[in-house]
Amino acid sequence: MNTIDLDEKISSRLSRLRNNLIKNGKVIPGTTDTMFKIVMTSCKSYLTFLISEFININESDLVKKIIIQNNELPLSNAKERKKISDFIAKVDKSLINFEMNSEYFDGLLIRNQAYLGKIEGESLNASEDYSNMQRFLQVNFNDFIHFKSDSPILEFVYTDIVNGEIETENLKKYHISLPKLEKKYYNGDKLSKLEKALLILKLDKIKDLEEISKGDEDLMEAVERIKDATFDINTIGLYDAELDRKWKEEAKIAYYNKLARKDGREEGREEEQSSIITNMLNNGITPIKITEMTGIPLEKVKRWV
């Protein structure tokens, strides 16, 4: 197959993907890496509103103060893994780290805590004046349910576990459960403007997006941008690549799951189990996930980490 044929094949596939979205009245959801970054970097009114809600500053005072920063965090040493945060914005003395977490996995919260710590450390190294220490906030958009609370928006600070005394207000994390917000919406519960703004990142039906944003310019800006980007062939190309990576990951997990159930649970098959564990770890599957999929005891899996 020559280059022209390949280009035509790719173009045809992307057109089918776009036409399928149009036919079903859907958009690329904001929970995807592709659309999340588009919304956060190009919807100034929407972003301003979100930030104003989390740092409690009037929107009109924020408009000219928001600075979007590089999301690639510097490495401390050659052995450290490359860290790329989803989105970082600076407002005066506040740094806000937005993270879109499409699925929960063992170590997610630790990874995101490492991102926040890295951002804090780099900021302090730059200023060297602890008296001018900035506020650091991390807002986690979670496309899953992890915490038991019924509230879709949870706020965390460092506190004493006995009397609840707060150590500092300068370090704060929010966890937003998008599925809980979606449930509120489809149950017909009343939503605040903040809840609607957050839900825009989850919904993928144009009808629903237009309904919750109707009459609000901040929200309508984000919805219109999502619709425009969805039907742009360049965005479709990025989305297609993202879907391809996801499908390959799911196929990889399914393969190891099948392999493990076939060979890994049989007694006396130590060599097969070891091979399965090693391959799954090398492919980025966490120890707890391996145990869930294969039935191999967690202690045994951890010996191979």
Image (cartoon, rainbow, N blue to C red):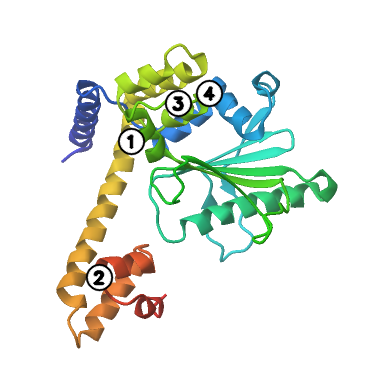
For the residues carrying marks 4 and 1, which lies nearer the camera in this image? 4
Residue that sits furthest to the bottom in the current view: 268
* Amino acid under disc 1: Tyr
Q: Quadrant of residue 138?
A: top right
The quadrant of the image that shows the C terminus is bottom left
Determine which residue is flagged by label 2.
294
178 w.r.t. 303: above or below: above
* Amino acid under disc 3: Leu
Sort mark 4 into few (<14), some (14-19) or many (20+) by Cα contacts within 10 Å. Answer: some
Q: Quadrant of residue 298?
A: bottom left
274 w.r.t. 241: above or below: below
Q: Which mark is residue 239?
A: 1
Q: Which mark is residue 46?
A: 4
For the residues carrying marks 3 and 4, which lies nearer the camera in this image? 3
Determine which residue is flagged by label 3.
191
The quadrant of the image that shows the N terminus is top left
In this image, 54 relative to 300: left or right?
right
First of labels 3, 4 by sequence position: 4
For the residues carrying marks 1 and 2, which lies nearer the camera in this image? 2
First of labels 1, 2 by sequence position: 1
Residues at discs 1 and 2 in contact (Cβ within 8 Å): no
